[in-house]
Amino acid sequence: MAQDTSGTQLVANWHATGRVVSVVVEICWDGTNWVDESTRALAVAWADSLLHEREGLPLLGQTAPAAASVELDNHDGRYSPDLTGSQANTYYPDGIWDLPVRISAGFYDGATPETLRQYTGRAYQAREYETMAEGRPAQRAMLSLWDESAPLRQDKLTTDMYVDQRPDEILDDLLTEVGVASYDLDVAMGIVPWAWLDEENVWEELSQLAAADGGWVRATKEGEIVFERVTHWLEGTDHTSSQATITRGRAWRLEDAISHKDLYSEVAVAYTPRTLGALDTIYSAREAIEVPPGETVERVCRYQVPALYVVTPVVDTDYTALRAGGTDARADLSVGMTSYANQAVIELTNANANHSVWVLNLKLRGFPVDAEDEEQVTEVSGAGEIAGDKTYRLSANDYIQTKVQADRLAGFLRDRLGRYRRLWGFECVLAPWLEVGDRVTITNADAGIDGDGYLVAYECSYRVGGMLTMTGVVLPADNLFGADGYFIIGTSATKDVGSDPLFY
Amino acid sequence: MRVEFPTIPEVADTMVASAATLNTWSSALTYLLGESHAPFASTFTMRDDEEEYRDTYQTVVVGYAPYRGEETIYYAFEAYQNSGGANNWHARIGFYGDDDAWHWVYETNGTDGAFAYKSGTHGLTAGELAQLTDGEVYEWRIQIKGDNETYNTYLRLWQIGLLAAISDWPAAPTFVEDGVPDADDFNTIRTSAQKLADFLPAINWCGGGEPVREWNHGSWGTVQRGVIRYRPESLLCVVRYRQRHGFAGRTVRWQVQVRDTAGNEADVYESGDLATTGGYEEQTEEIDLTAGAAATALAAAGIALTVGSLYRVTIRMRRTTSDAEVLDLYGGMVIRTSDGTPDGAWVTPNLWGHLATDVGPTHLNAYWTDLTLLYSGAEVLHGATPVLCHLHTDGSSNRSLHGIHRKRWLHYRCLDADDAPRLYYGASHGQAQTLDAGAGWVAYDLEQIAALPYGATYWLSRTLTAFEADGELL
């Protein structure tokens, strides 16, 4: 979503023939206060993209974290963790890791700098090095940054079973669970019948859940995690009306390329229905478990299949307990359980002060959530822009479990992939309010280009004394969806004939 | 795998409307229409009148019902005392709560000197509700007594049960030509459909049975009585019998009677003379109550069938020859059925597709038309879960429940924890499956019986009470 420029002259100055740039780099050393390090920032670069590096348009939005780098003047060792008394040594004596950094950029309006946040992230690496500047050795530090999705790419979670929830409802819960304070989630279109995490990477699962609805999750320039649903680009003003016009007058490079690899004659979306089975054994211990006298032993029991309603083990039914020598020890043992969707943590407590208790044949019973045979929905493109059969098969998403989900995904993917897609490239002065997904206009009379598209990738850079530049990749809006406009709830008028059309 | 009410996504303002989402509304409506026309077995009522003469409460009927949050019970029975109006009959209804105590939630009395129909609803108190847990099955009882021991008090059960409620039924959403409805309008369809789905009984009950009766008379002998909640248009009735030493010349007849709560009774079906074989035999008849002889008989008896009202159905049988050989009456099924024809006002919900441009009042208001029919019109759904009763004194294994298979799991209580029930199914119910025996409630996956298709009828022996549910858990 394009950033708000009201109350500033950023747009006017961007249009002007000349402008004075302002770049601000801030670091939050103590976790609370942001310190302006701009005077030491020699060069900054940042980038964001919705284009999947390898898969391209089919996996739009499922991308690596936005990256940035900041080159800093380190003549006094401020960024050297090993230098006693330095700023880095004070706060990060063991090395800079996960250091909050933010970058803002814009232009001066007269004497007043006007900037917008360009990047919010964390330094995962701080490389110190010596270089030559003006013929003399110069100490530098280079911070490499990830955006605010990065911490979630490290987190792993184990959850209960989510039943019949929208992806945004699950995302809401997961983001809260991992302590993300700021997020904005579109209401998803579909429902995921069964979802769970079992020590799985949070970001990967967030992305898969979003993708099951045709959308994506990403971190914004402000560091906010957002979920944008499949129709997001058809709804908000930032995506339905142009936020900037890139003309030859404002760009020093415009290019046009056709993406052949993203063209398919048909799309096949696989889905795997799941059903709740009958009460059954979902875990069996493979060994006897010794619980020493007066001790509690904890076992993590991973089920054979995910399950709902797991029964706390019942003596004689789900386990037996005895001492060495075969004496009954059932009275000495108490069993507690914390169950999740795909594992349970069993606590076995031995109340006997002298004898170990051996727990034999421990098993867990529950109602398995069984995966049925995989089904598939296929949509054939009628655009006729490719000879022969070339099928894009989407099959690796466990959250696509219903035909309704698969129908919708196959429909709009067919529209996206059934035609050759041009990718317009440009290079210009940074338009600081633009974010990925914003609608922009590209005009290049010499190339015959005059159209709108979505900014799907950009790279920005600035070096002291140099230009504040932006290179971008724009995906033309024409024919990207089955219609240019759809029926929007709360906006479109109901008509028996001639209403705005429905989406898939 | 089972037929499920669809999960309907919520929509939000500024969201693009999706054909798939709107189609879940259509799917929800057709699901509810199917439920409106679902077959149900009749519930138990006594074959013969039950009487007590004591001045302290005596249990006449025992039953079970799963609880799922209802706050109201309903009752329908007939009672009187033969004191000629001089004294009172008393009746009370109660359940055995989580606190291992009986809670007599409703008590009433009267001086009626002949059977008088009593019906109504009664709200459960907070204290009573506190002793009921969602998803658990509770035992209910009906007790009667008189003011003194001099006169007899009589009871005929019609039906008691738990009554779900629909609260906050919304106003109709506004869909007009060139109007701009918001998400609330759209979501009203979703919410209302969901309310109706939640309102439906969670179980498919098995009909009560009576012990096998030897009938040595040429007069009509009652095989089975049951109570149905009427919806157009038919009754599926089955009678199972054996004429000992039967042969072609030793014939029998059977008939079906329908009685309303005012006491009017009509013979809606009577067979011709049926030759016998000496073996177990069954007769099946689906009787359209809205046409032909059945409708004529009902009209002549002054019975105007009303959707949602209770009717008592009796199956009777007799020998038509005077030979003294015994006629064994093994049991009868009474099942309410429908041919599925919706009410004339029903509008088949639209199926939407990508790029559909007819998102207008005609299709959108049809949803509300149908929802209204299901809520309060001719397709009205009922949130009544009857207590599945049997006589308190009836511990006989020589009786069969009956059911029509609609849900996957059969939950039952065995008459004897060590005596495995049997389920008879197939043509003339000639195939048998031994179920699991056990104490308390036992759940059996009916999908294990490959030759028992959904919609098929069955007899169930050696069980005290039974019902089907979608899940192994309630």
Image: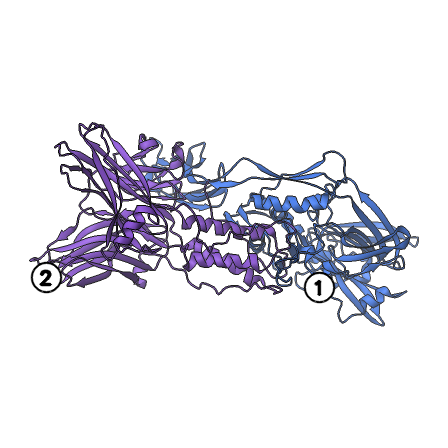
Chain colours: A blue, B purple
Reply above or below: B135 against A302. below
Question: How far is mark 1 from mark 2, CA to CA?
Answer: 94 Å
Q: How many marks?
A: 2
Q: Amino acid at mark 1?
A: Trp
| Displayed quadrant of residue A349 | top left
Residue B388 coordinates in the image, percent (x, y): 28, 48
Q: Amino acid at mark 2?
A: Gly
| Displayed quadrant of residue A286 | top left
Chain under label 2?
A: B
The residue where tag 1 is placed is: A34
Q: Please say whether residue A486 is visible from this viewpoint.
A: yes
The residue where tag 2 is placed is: B84
Q: Please say whether residue A357 is visible from this viewpoint.
A: no
Residue B86 coordinates in the image, percent (x, y): 10, 64
Furthest-left residue in this view = B150
> Pointer 2: residues within 10 angstroms few (<14), some, or many (20+)?
few
Reply above or below: B444 against A457. above
